[in-house]
Amino acid sequence: MSSIFRDSYMQIDEEGTYHKINEAYFKGGHKQAVEALERNLDIKIDDYVSFNWAAVAKGISALGGVDLELSDAEFFYINAFITETVQSTGIPSVHLEHAGMNHLDGIQAVAYGRLRLMDTDFNRTARQRKVLGLAFDKAKKAGPVKLMQVACMVLPELSTSLDMGDITTLVTQVDRYHIGESRGFPFARTTMKIKKMDVVIPATLSSNVTELHSYLYGVENYSPSAKVQEISAHIAKVSGVGSPMEDAEEAGTGGGTVRKKEAGKAKAAENAEKGKKKKKEEQTEATKKQETKDGNGRREHCKK
């Protein structure tokens, strides 16, 4: 399984426009996205599935959720993403209460896969692949009947070239499949600003495509097409990165750092909340004392 980093600087249309690769989907949906990937990577995509967050959330919840461990930094940010995902999908969920091992429903798992504020987009895609892997493990144990129910539930949220016959075949044979290695693409890369955009530069596109064909298809010493070499040369000219680099270390999950400014705001909010709670408790205690005093006064009056 491979994630194409959304900020990868590539040619996104036949007119020769260069932009972040996710702009291809934004401009022309799955059709332009598939064509752009095929053009830049020398691959042939047989089928596609395009889905929204609601599809992921419903599917994972229907499979019983997933178990994973949250770092302190991941936990610091996840509840805000849970709130945002609930608002965007209309699917209810709840906030998590602690870091460490958690059982996540679909919305919470989507929120986890969207986290990026504590580290980088490279780590974010690693989290997404982790969630997909855990969900796939659940799917393999669910059985065909349950999987058909899940498929029918999420199909309204999908755009896909697969028909019901294709999906039925996948469902009945799911226990024969497994997810092997998981990596992000481009393997060798650097980051920079081009035209005020923060982009990921493949170093180089040609050498990365050669490695991709080895990774996906087992083809050694693949020679990229003239088109890929042309695109690669343009990227090298614009970025100044014209020589292959070492593969970047594969990004992981479970780490991250809370930004000092946000940590400070959170601490201030926590202290403010503690202050409100203390004031409320003091007011409650004062009210109780006054009620006791008033009650004692009434009893004394009755005695007289």
Image: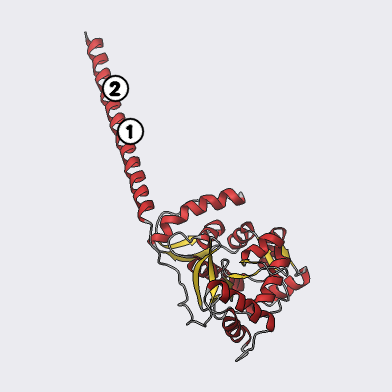
Question: In this rendering, would 59 be left or right of 47?
Answer: left
Q: Please identify the quadrant where the N terminus is shown.
A: bottom right
**Depth check, front residue: 176 or 260:** 260
**Depth check, front residue: 46 or 231:** 231
Amino acid marked by disc 2: Glu
> What x and y, as percent, mark residue 235?
59, 74
Q: Residue shown at 24%/15% (left/top)?
A: 297
* Quarter of the view holding residue 208: bottom right
Q: Secondary structure at mark 1?
A: helix
Question: In this rendering, would 124 be left or right of 59?
Answer: left
> What x and y, as percent, mark residue 292?
26, 23
Instruction: Tell me how far mark 2 sits from mark 1, CA to CA.
Output: 16 Å
Say the numbered circle drawn on residue 291: 2
Q: Residue shown at 29%/22% (left/top)?
A: 291
- Total numbered circles: 2
Q: Residue shown at 48%/61% (left/top)?
A: 116
Q: Secondary structure at mark 2?
A: helix
Q: Please identify the quadrant where the C terminus is shown.
A: top left
- Return the disc, 2 or 1, that comes first in the chain's sequence: 1
Q: Residue furthest top?
A: 304
Say the numbered circle drawn on residue 116: none
Amino acid marked by disc 1: Lys
**Depth check, front residue: 187 or 40:** 40
> What x and y, as percent, mark residue 293?
24, 20
Q: Is residue 281 above or below residue 48?
A: above
| Between marks 2 and 1 in the image, the one whose residue lies nearer the viewer | 1
Mark 1 — residue?
280
* Quarter of the view holding residue 55: bottom right
